[in-house]
Amino acid sequence: MTDQTLMNSDEQIALFSLAPDAAAVAGDYLAHLQGGRRASGKTIEAYGRDIAQFGKFLQGYLGKAAGLDELAALRPVDFRAFLAARRKEGDGPRTIARKLSSLRGLYRWLARRHGIDNPALSALSGPRIAQALPHPLSPREARKALDAASGGDEHRPPWVAARDVAVLALLYGCGLRISEALSLTLEQARPLAGDKADMLRVTGKGGKERLVPVLPAVRQALREYIRLCPFELKGDEAVFRGVRGGSLSPRVIQLLTARLRGALGLPESATPHALRHSFATHLLAAGGDLRTIQELLGHASLSTTQIYTQVDTASLLAQYRKAHPRA
């Protein structure tokens, strides 16, 4: 589903459960997301699944596969019926909100490229979603996790321990997403490991690049891993390897943090992504500028980064209530 441009018309009709003209437009829209908008594969897959569910719903709702004329004639009550059906199937508020976003994107494409304007969607409001605060580790917990990852284990070769430390150091020391850390190539890592650079160029969501400063401790961890790695590392290939020599799976790092949680008594929220949250929260607590943190994290919108101000305030209030004699 992530490469819609390779689908023929019959495959599009079967996938989207729409009439041929509407199915072709849906395929073109997802191809636009992939090529023009450079959306991630997961985003394209999710949007394609949403449109396919919408098409299947309309097929039963209207008694036939919907074409462009039917899409243009839909009323607010028709869209509400689809969303209600998805709620009945167990979709939560966030999923419902994404499906609404998928449909709005499709209809914007219809209006822009095919002159089909349906104002019905503008009459709908998405579900209210409670904003969940990130759960960062404390500085002490983060240090304990990195120290424990480097600890001795007779069943774990030294190069594996060095690899695990290097990955966790990139998550906490540079604020990388796990996918960004594991896609790091030798060409990117070698200058850092050799003390020839102190900035890392990261390719994030949507293919967007950003520069992230690298601390000496992170450079040292990369240097040690590259020195000990038993496999031949090539410049344009992922630098982090699994025990059989292939690219390291995120699941390995997820299992590592699960073991660290058990060994160190860390909360269930202590995941690889929590180290990225910790990076942002600890920078903010130390006086870091919100706009700078946004750039370091690769957030498209400042509003996404502002959630860390709530975490910092919540931590301050917790300490106040704990310490004040009249709290």
Image (tube, helix red, strand yellow):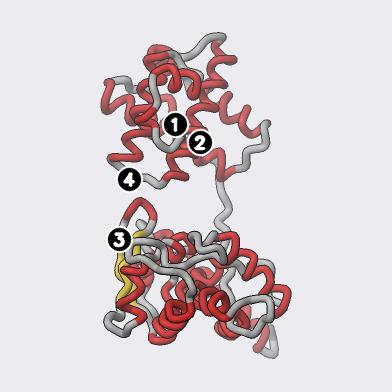
> Which badge, 1 or 4, comes first in the chain's sequence?
4
Amino acid carrying label 4: it is Arg
CB under 8 Å between discs 3 and 1: no
For disc 1, the marked residue is 103
Say which mark, if any, is on residue 209. 3
Amino acid carrying label 2: it is Lys
Tell me which corner region of the image, top left, top right, bottom left or bottom right, holds residue 32: top left
> How far apart in space, not on screen, are marks 2 and 3 (Cα)?
28 Å
Tell me which corner region of the image, top left, top right, bottom left or bottom right, holds residue 121: top left
Spot occupied by residue 158 in the image (x, y as percentages of width and height)? 57, 81
Crowding around mark 4 (Cα neighbors within 10 Å: few <14, some 14 to 19, many 20+) is: some
Q: Secondary structure at mark 3?
A: strand
Can residue 283 be seen here? no
For disc 2, the marked residue is 99
Amino acid carrying label 3: it is Glu
Can residue 257 be seen here? yes
> Which badge, 3 or 1, comes first in the chain's sequence?
1
> Which badge, 3 or 4, comes first in the chain's sequence?
4
Task: Look at the picture and state if 60 lies above or below 196.
Answer: above
> How far apart in space, not on screen, are marks 1 and 4 (Cα)?
18 Å
Spot occupied by residue 227 in the image (x, y as percentages of width and height)? 43, 81
Q: Secondary structure at mark 2?
A: helix
In this rendering, the count of numbered labels is 4
Judged by depth in the image, the label closer to the viewer, 2 or 3, is 3
Crowding around mark 1 (Cα neighbors within 10 Å: few <14, some 14 to 19, many 20+) is: some
For disc 4, the marked residue is 38
Closest to the observer: 216 or 231? 231
Position of 313 with respect to 10 (left or right) is: right
> Which badge, 4 or 2, comes first in the chain's sequence?
4
